[in-house]
Image (tube, rainbow, N blue to C red):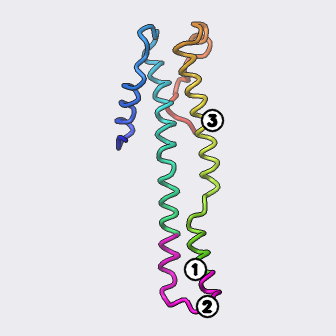
Amino acid sequence: MPQTFEEFLDLFYRAFVPPREVRELFHDQLMLRQVAQTVWDRLHLYERQVQQENARLDAALQKDTQPVESFKELRARTYAVQAAFQIEPWLTTALVELDTYLDQDVRRLVKWRYGPPVYREVCPPPPNATTRQ
């Protein structure tokens, strides 16, 4: 996969070349950019989770360097390792949100390209389709 969003967007533009009858290429590219941005965000969502897991695991492994002397110590250390891989609540929420965005973005692009002409007039791309909060 490309290392930058611009390279990734170029890949999307090549993979989703619009049909010749697209009326406004700029608007088509705005919507395709939004699909690409959502996919890019989804691909990079796990990086944050991985960074947090690495930090927690490092802390758990660095914390105790003495020999394990009892069952209680063993359980405590193994629980710390297991806890390092706990899925953060924000990850589940973000995945659901990005899935919803992707569905909306794809539907909008399909309707824009292949829906009735009235759709392009009634529901043009958002003026600032590249920013989503």
Position of 37 relative to 44 (above/below): above
Q: Residues within 10 Å of mark 3 (few under 14, many from 20)?
A: few
Q: Secondary structure at mark 3?
A: helix
Q: Answer with mark 1 or mark 2, whichever residue precedes in sequence.
A: 2
Q: Identify which residue, 80 or 48, lies in the foreground.
A: 80
Where the C terminus falls, by quadrant?
top right
**Closer to the observer: label 1 or label 3?**
1
Position of 57 relative to 6 (above/below): below
Q: Is residue 67 magenta?
A: yes
* Residue holding disc 2: 70
Q: Identify which residue, 27 or 55, lies in the foreground.
A: 55
Residue flagged by tag 2: what amino acid is it? Ser
Residue at left offset 51%, top offset 90%: 67
The dot on residue 100 is: 3
Q: Position of residue 119 (x, y in %)?
A: 60, 12
Q: Answer with mark 1 or mark 3, whichever residue precedes in sequence.
A: 1
Residue flagged by tag 3: what amino acid is it? Thr
Q: CA distance from mark 1 to mark 2?
A: 11 Å
Magenta stretch, residue numbers: 57-75
Q: Position of residue 117 (x, y in %)?
A: 57, 7
* Residue holding disc 1: 77
Residue flagged by tag 1: what amino acid is it? Arg
Snapshot quadrant of residue 80:
bottom right
Q: Position of residue 125 (x, y in %)?
A: 54, 21
